């Protein structure tokens, strides 16, 4: 079974907003682009809007598809729909108590991301 996920690359002033996965989650202790599971009859963009409001407390105004990544971990397969979020209302924060940070694009490589997110980091740096 493939788990579908929508993730937001929240951008502002050449910085990107990232969150630390809690230790008890899959890939815990890694940094990630916030988001969450796409429900059964939900479009990825709708899941993105819902998840970013739930996790970060923002309302997405403008988002565009960035990349689709399929990745097989030893224990699960994921399909990650990444969106660049360039306009939003509210100030992103760790609404669920997670550690968060605004990081300059060039410093992204200093953070440990899940394997499936590594191509996204590389693409952001290349852009």
Image: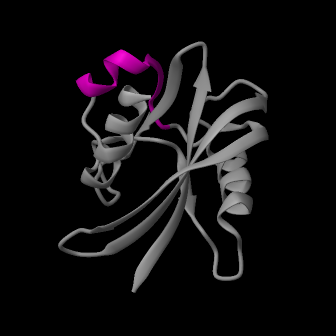
To which quarter of the image does residue 21 belong? top left
Q: Position of residue 59 (x, y in %)?
A: 79, 39
Instruction: Give the residue displayed 78% in from the left and 27% down from the top.
Output: 90
* Magenta region: 98-110
Residue 108 forms part of the magenta stretch:
yes
Residue farthest left in this picture? 74
Instruction: Give the residue displayed 26% in from the left and 26% down from the top.
Output: 109
Instruction: Give the residue displayed 29% in from the left and 44% down from the top.
Output: 118
Which quadrant of the rendered structure holds the C terminus?
Answer: top left
Q: Is residue 54 left or right of residue 83?
A: right
Whether residue 26 is situated above or below residue 112 in the rendered picture: below
Q: Is residue 75 left or right of residue 3?
A: left
Which quadrant of the rendered structure holds the N terminus?
Answer: bottom left
Q: Position of residue 97 (x, y in %)?
A: 52, 37
Q: Is residue 118 left or right of residue 95?
A: left
Whether residue 12 is situated above or below residue 52 in the rendered picture: above
To which quarter of the image does residue 9 belong? top right
């Amino acid at each position: 079974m493939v788990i579908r996920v929508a993730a937001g690359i929240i951008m502002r002033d050449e910085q990107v907003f990232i969150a630390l996965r809690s230790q008890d989650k899959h890939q815990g202790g890694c940094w990630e682009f916030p988001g969450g599971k796409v429900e059964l009859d939900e479009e990825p963009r709708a899941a993105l809007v819902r998840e970013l409001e739930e996790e970060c407390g923002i309302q997405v105004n403008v988002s565009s598809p960035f990349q689709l990544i399929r990745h097989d971990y030893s224990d699960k397969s994921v399909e990650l729909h990444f969106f660049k979020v360039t306009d939003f209302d509210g100030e992103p924060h760790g609404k669920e108590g997670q550690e968060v940070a605004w990081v300059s694009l060039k410093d992204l490589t200093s953070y440990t991301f899940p394997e499936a997110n590594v191509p996204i980091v590389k693409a952001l740096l290349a852009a």
